[in-house]
Image (tube, rainbow, N blue to C red):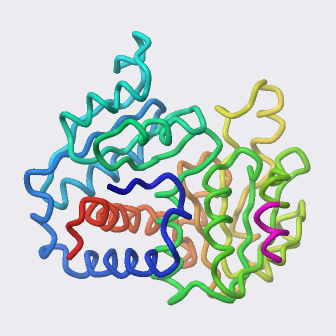
Amino acid sequence: MRHLMSPLDFSVSELEKLMSLASDIEKNPEVYAHKCAGKKLATCFYEPSTRTRLSFEAAMLNLGGSVLGFSSADSSSAAKGESVSDTLRVISCYADICAIRHPKEGAPLVASIHSGIPVINAGDGGHQHPTQTLTDLFTIHSLHGEIRDLTIGLCGDLKFGRTVHSLINALVRYPGIRFVLISPEELRVPDYIREEVLDKNNIPYVEVEKLEEAMPELDILYMTRVQKERFFNEEDYIRMKDFYILDREKMKLAKENMMVLHPLPRVNEISVEVDDDPRAAYFRQAQYGVYIRMALILTLLGLEE
């Protein structure tokens, strides 16, 4: 039995197989429409989510399976004090696979240790968001052709953004990747990412504060929102929330084939006027998320053949 806690749980060759499967699912959805008939996915979301939870549900339903679960801690026995490990022991009696999101870092790992079914980390605090990373990699692979020799700008909340942390960890394994880290001083990438991931792997990167300065050299711009739920006081959040706004004028500085990605939800860090730009790929990214989660469910259940 295998779980997914981190994007590093899959080797690069395994990720290639997963993306190849997702690509085939996109092209031939009817072939996979009944692959999970009789199987159940439990979605245990202790934190609010729209895209991640619904894309997991859509993925399982597209495969012919069914879904059960809860969408907030208040609607589960966590409100009565039940531990995550006990919850997963019980859910293992009801479902074949589980996707869990939790505000505490490491909670999905604890759940997996005590689970009788495969567990997928759907986000744990500011730590990891591996299926968003799989979505990001598949989007880059699908729209760019391959993952190599790219200058990738990560913009916004690089301190608390688990999507950014997961993506950096995954991308350093590909050749020719260079990062431009765009953030205010207060939201810079954590030291452990800089030292243990970037420096340790000799990955070239620069840290800048102005988005305009970075735009002309980027192949991919990965925007993130400043996350109110990660701040300890509202004053800091208000001061930071509008630090970056991508608009039409800034897009004029970018390459003609640059892609703009965003894990969503956005607040106002990408102006709606950018949505019609052919380089805006964030809604396509959300669709790719369903295909890659379908491929992941099939793989963890051993039904990928």
Q: Quadrant of the N terminus?
A: bottom left
Residue name at image x 20 percent, y 67 percent: 303
- Relative to residue 213, is residue 271 drawn left or right? left
Instruction: Examine the image and state in which quarter residue 92 appears.
Output: top left
- 67 is higher (above) or lower (below) than 9: above
Residue name at image x 36 percent, y 35 percent: 44
Q: Is residue 199 magenta?
A: yes
Residue 218 on image: x %, y %: 74, 79
Residue name at image x 44 percent, y 21 percent: 83
Residue name at image x 87 percent, y 51 percent: 184
Observer-nearest residue: 2 or 96?
2
- Total marks placed: 0
Q: Quadrant of the C terminus?
A: bottom left
Instruction: Examine the image and state in which quarter residue 201 appears.
Output: bottom right
Q: Is residue 47 magenta?
A: no
- 227 is higher (above) or lower (below) than 153: above
Residue 240 on image: x %, y %: 81, 41
- Relative to residue 262, is residue 1 drawn left or right? left
Q: Which residues are magenta?
A: 196-202
Residue 81 on image: x %, y %: 44, 12
Residue 125 on image: x %, y %: 60, 38
